[in-house]
Amino acid sequence: MEKNLIAQASTDIDASPKEVWKALLDPEAIRQYMFGARVDSDWREGSPIVWRGEWKGKAYEDKGVVLRVRPEQKLEYSHFSPLSGMRDDPENYHTVTIELAPRGNGTRVTLAQDKNRTEEARDHSQKNWEMMLQDLKKVAET
């Protein structure tokens, strides 16, 4: 079984990288585009991240660590969800990489999430990330 299928999503946003970056880190903005999740982090490399919310009627508390921060260019973090049914072991954490690139008067946002264990899991993650990026687009453009 392939254990590193990568989910990918991207979108163009009619806002500057600075405005998109602000939306990526702002807890109130995150709540609007990330399915209502409440996030807690200081967004410094090595700092923890905790996402809390409800998904399909189940409360959750996901966690991760900020791995890389290049303001207005790149955000990378690990992510683990107990709802996955997996053990809380390092090999069961995804790495999510979000990159911003100027594109005309706007920003191209690309996202990748590694360690999807099956094609079905990758496709599911990819659809969720595509929805999230469309909502990020709405938030950043307003």
Image: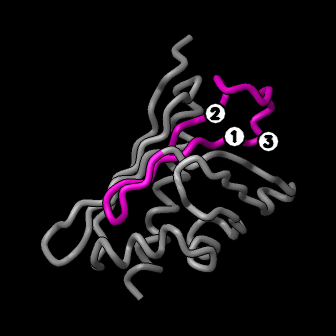
> Given this view, does label 2 or label 3 mark the residue nearer the observer?
2
117 versus 140 height, above or below: above
Q: Secondary structure at mark 3?
A: helix
Q: Which residue is mark 1?
A: 80
Q: Can you give x and y, in whole percent of width and height, for residue 100 in the image?
A: 31, 60
Q: Can you give x and y, in whole percent of width and height, for residue 16 in the image?
A: 27, 77
Q: Which residue is mark 3?
A: 83
Q: Residue 44's quadrant in the figure?
A: bottom right
Give yes or no for contact between labels 3 and 1 (Cβ–Cβ under 8 Å).
Answer: no
90 versus 71 height, above or below: above
Q: Which residue is mark 2?
A: 93
What segment is highlighted magenta in the picture?
68-96
User: Quick one: label 3, few (<14), some, or many (20+) residues within 10 Å?
Assistant: few
User: Quick one: label 1, few (<14), some, or many (20+) residues within 10 Å?
Assistant: many
- Quadrant of the frame with the N terminus: top right
49 versus 16 height, above or below: above
The residue drawn where x is 62% and y is 46% is: 65
Question: Which residue occupies the foreground of this view, 42 or 83?
Answer: 42
Residue type highlighted by circle 2: Tyr
The residue drawn where x is 80% and y is 26% is: 87
Residue type highlighted by circle 3: Leu
